[in-house]
Amino acid sequence: MKMQKVMTLQGHQGAVNVAEFNKSGEYVATGGADRSVKLWNPQSGLCVKTYSGHGKEVLGIAISPDNTKFASVGGDKAAVLWDVATGRSIRKFTGHGARINDVGFNFDASVIVTGSYDATVRFWDCRAQSYTPIQILSEAKDSVSSIQVTKQEVLSASIDGKLRVYDIRMGMCNVDDVGHSITSARFSNDENCILASTLDGVIRLFDKENGELLASYKGHKNTDYKIISTLSNDDAYVVSGSEDGRICFWDLVEGTMVNSIAAHGTGAMGKLVTSVTYHPTDDTLITTSTDGLCHVYSK
């Protein structure tokens, strides 16, 4: 899995925590410690627009399926719904008792789902007049670190070591105990598997249906901080950042590391790579880091 750096996105003041491609992959949104979200053209490196309105750092971003809106969450305990074109906030949802770590949209962007340090998952109706959550899930015993929403399921990961898959239509919840604090969890692109990053320095792949451990991926450093790992768009590779500045690639099936790139410094000079996000169709990825830079890598 050979990749080379083709662009650096520079403009945030302080650490960048998250990046998210829009559904067509033409643009990428990044959120950082400077309390802003920035929209970039990753090919030209141009910052198209900056969205300011959070009181503290931005920790999570979700872009609507039609690319017209996005939601951002962060340390100010608020979820903000934005209009992409105008740059204006449409609504602000408050009610969580602590920072919000992640956010997702449902299939038609009528509902956003948030996961918080207060150990709850909350559903917010973007169309209703009420600003109170329409549902609260409180099964987690510790901070909800990661959220992903599909057409009929919500994947929630928690520092309590549990993966929870909520079937929205059936009203059921399946729970798998990973045994270690989970900082990030994502469905595979075919939605048959779940990739979970944990603070014991291991990334694990589970079968969604029966919870069977399919593979483990090691060799990066992740024992202290949240790192958002991902899969390539064809589910062939696992990709993750590392606390020593590297991005690492593993063969999904074999479990072997096939590449390691010093993306944000090396050794003692390496800066935490906070997230890796993969382009929906092309072999392009974005890294974010505490060094304030976002790098674009491509084959």
Image (cartoon, grey):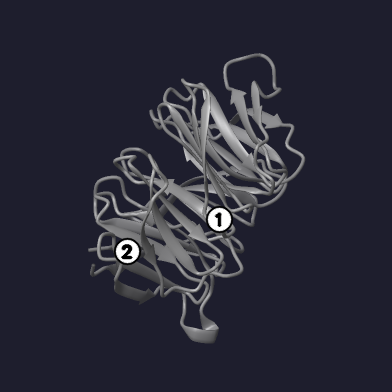
Which residue appears farthest toward the top when viewing the image? 129
Instruction: Please identify the quarter of the rendering in which residue 91 is found.
Output: top right
Is residue 37 found left or right of 246 in the rendered image?
A: right
Depth order, front residue of 41/269: 269
The quarter of the image holding the C terminus is: bottom left
Label 2 residue SS: strand
Which residue is rendered at x = 41% and y = 75% of the image? 219
Which residue is rendered at x = 28% and y = 60% of the image? 252
Instruction: Please identify the quarter of the rendering in which residue 79 is found.
Output: top right
Depth order, front residue of 206/257: 206
Q: Is residue 20 above or below residue 288?
A: above
Numbered label attached to residue 182: 1
N-terminal-most mark, 1 or 2: 1
Is residue 148 found left or right of 280 in the rendered image?
A: right
Is residue 78 found left or right of 248 in the rendered image?
A: right
Image location of residue 24, percent across then percent down: 31, 39
Label 1 residue SS: strand
Q: Could one spot residue 276 in this view of the protein?
A: yes
Of badges 1 and 2, nearer the viewer stands 1
- How many residues crowd mark 2 within 10 Å: few (<14), some (14–19), many (20+)? many
Numbered label attached to residue 297: 2
From mark 1 to mark 2, how far is it between C-alphas? 26 Å
Residue type for callout 2 = Tyr
The quarter of the image holding the N terminus is: bottom left
Q: How many badges with numbers are in the image? A: 2
Depth order, front residue of 297/145: 145
Q: Could one spot residue 295 in this view of the protein?
A: no
Q: Is residue 98 above or below residue 271?
A: above
Image location of residue 202, percent across then percent down: 46, 66
Image location of residue 265, percent across then percent down: 47, 79
Image location of residue 246, percent across then percent down: 43, 74
Residue type for callout 1 = Ile
